[in-house]
Amino acid sequence: MKEFLYYPGCSMSGTAKGYADSLEAIAEPLGIDLREVDDWSCCGASEYFSIGPLRGYALVARNLALAQRDANGSRILVAPCSQCYVNLAKTNKYIRTDTMLAGKVNEALSAAGLAYTPGSIEVRHLFEIVIHDVGVDAVREKVVRPLSGLKIAPYLGCLVTRPDPEKRWKAKEHPREFDRLLEALGAEVVDYPLRTDCCGGHLSQISPSMGLEMMRRLLDSAERLGADVLATICPMCQMNIDLYQADVNRRFKTDFKIPILFFTQLVGLAFGMDAKVLGIGSEVVSSKRALKKIGIEVPEPDQVEPVAAGAAADRPRPPRARKGPELPMPKMPGDKGVGL
Amino acid sequence: MAESVRVADGSPSRGLPPDVVHGFIDEVRGAVPGDSRLQMCIQCGTCGGSCPSAADMDHTPRHLFAMVRAGSRDRVLASNTPWMCVSCHYCTVRCPQEVRIPDVMYGLKSIAAREGRSPSSAAPDFSRTFMSNVHRFGRSYEMGLVARHYLRHFPLRIPGMASTGMGMLASGRMDIRPHRIRDVKGLQAILAKAKELETLP
C-alpha cells in the first residue's frame, strides 16, 4: 500500500457520489491508501479567482496548509476532481514561484493560525496516480471480468493534461493513457478525437446556449463512433453531460442516451465488483442498457424509478434531425488514426 | 492612477479612441500572479482559433489583448470575453509565446468585478452566489446555488430540471442541507484578511 494525502473536493460527497463509492471500493486492490485531509474546505472552483483572486489563492492555500500539517507518510496530495486538482496545483506552483504572492497568502493564513511552506506539498490528480504510480500493467493483472464487447469513448476533459503546471504529461491534446487503461480492462476503446475537449464547465449555468453546444459536440462524436459509454475522470464533466443530456436533446432535437461513467466505476466492474457497490445506477442517463450488453445488471435506483432517473433517458423523443457537417479535427503528427 | 487621454483633434474616428488609458497593460499584468507574459503576445490569433467558446465572445482573446495594449480600458472591461472563457487551456498550450491566457482572463474579470463593470450576464452573479455559500459553510452548496441561480436567471428552465433534480436528491447526489466545515470562523478570518490585502496596491 502506498500512502497519499487525499483532498476529496465538494462534489465527492454530492453529485459525484458514484465516483466516491467506486474509488473507495478499488483503492485497496490498487494498493493506494488515501488519508483525507482534516477539515478541508472548497477549492473555489472557477469562481473565486474571477471576483477575488487573492481570496481564491488563500482559500486553496488553506487546504495546502492543512495537508502540510497532516503530512505524515506522504507529502503527495491527491485530488480526484480535475477542477480541484488544477486549482491546488496552480496555486501551489504560483506560491512557489512568486514570493510576493506567497507572502500575502501566508499573511492571510496567519489569521487562522495556519502557514504554508512553499513547495512542501506535491499536488497530483487521482487519474495520474493510477497511470503513473499504480500503472496500467498492475491494473490489468487484477482484471477478472474483462469488459469485452463494451465500446467506450475515453473522455479525459481539459484540466488534467492542460495546463499541466508540473509538466507530468507529454501529450496535452491527444494523450493515449486513458485509452491504454480502458484497453487493459478489456473494453473496446473508440478513437475519440474530442478526448480533451471542454464540457463547458460552468457555462451550463451562465450561458446555456454555448454550454449545451459544447456538450452536443462531445455526445455527437461519441455516438457517431458507436460508443456505449463515455468514460470520465472529472465530476464536473460527468455532472454536465449526465444532467444536461436531456436539455441537449431538447435543444438540438437529438436523441442521445449515452451514459457517463467514472473510470473508477469501470475499473471496479472489471475487478468483478458489484455495480451497486460502485455507485452505478445513480447516473441520470441510465447505463443499464449499455452494461446489459456485457451481462452486468444495474440496480434500480432506490425508490425513484421511473419518475426521475429513468424518465429523462427513456422518454420517447422526436426523430433525430439531420446534423450539420462534423467540425474538422486536427491530426497530430505521430497520432495514428486520430479524427473521424 | 492612469489618466484618460484624448487625441488633439478630438475626433473618435481618427487617431486614438477617447477611452485610452496609458499603462493599462501593466495594470492587467499586475492583476495576475507571476509573469503572465501578456506583453509577449504577437497577435497570431492561435488563441481565438483554439477557443471552444469564441463564438459567444464579443472579441476574440487576440483582439481583446490588442485592445489592452491600446489602452481601451472601458471597452475591455465591458467585454464579455473573459466571462465566456471556460479555462480549458487549449490556448495556453498552443500559444507560441506562452502567454497564460486564462490567468489574464481571471485578472480582467477581477478588475471588472471590483469596479462593478461586469457585463450584463449571469456569470458574475453566479460567482458571487458560489462564493457566499463557501464563505458561510466552507464547502460548495449545490442545492442552494442552483436554486437561487435558476430562480434569478433561468426560471423557465426550472420545470425541465425538476424530475432530474428529484432524481439527484433521491439517489443521494444532491443534499438539501449544506455540508459545513468545523473551522468556518478560521476560514472567514483568512478570507477577510485576503480581501483586505487584495485592495492594497
Image (tube, coloured by chain):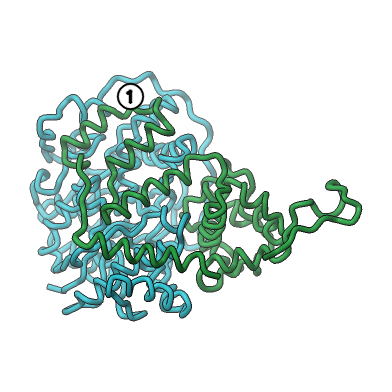
Chain colours: A cyan, B green
- The image position of residue B104, as x and y in percent, is 55, 61
Q: Which residue lies at the image location 60% right of the left edge and 63% below the top edge?
A: B28
In the foreground, A191 or B155: B155
In the foreground, B41 or B123: B123
Amino acid type for the residue under numbered disc 1? Pro
Q: Which residue lies at the image location 40% right of the left edge and 62% below the top edge?
A: A56
Mark 1 residue crowding within 10 angstroms, few (<14) / some (14–19) / many (20+): few
Q: Report which residue position mark 1 lands on.
A: B159
Q: Quadrant of residue A299?
A: top left
Q: Which residue lies at the image location 61% right of the left edge and 47% below the top edge?
A: B79
Q: In this view, does A220 lie to the left or right of A313?
A: right
Q: Quadrant of residue B80?
A: top right
| B132 up-or-down from B201: above or below | above
- The image position of residue A67, as x and y in percent, is 24, 72
Image mark 1: chain: B
Residue A99 visible to the viewer: yes
In the foreground, A231 or A35: A35
Q: In this view, does A6 lie to the left or right of A204?
A: left
In the foreground, B38 or B193: B193
Q: Where does the N terminus of chain A fall, quadrant-wise? A: bottom left
- The image position of residue A21, as x and y in percent, is 14, 51
Q: What element carries label 1?
A: helix
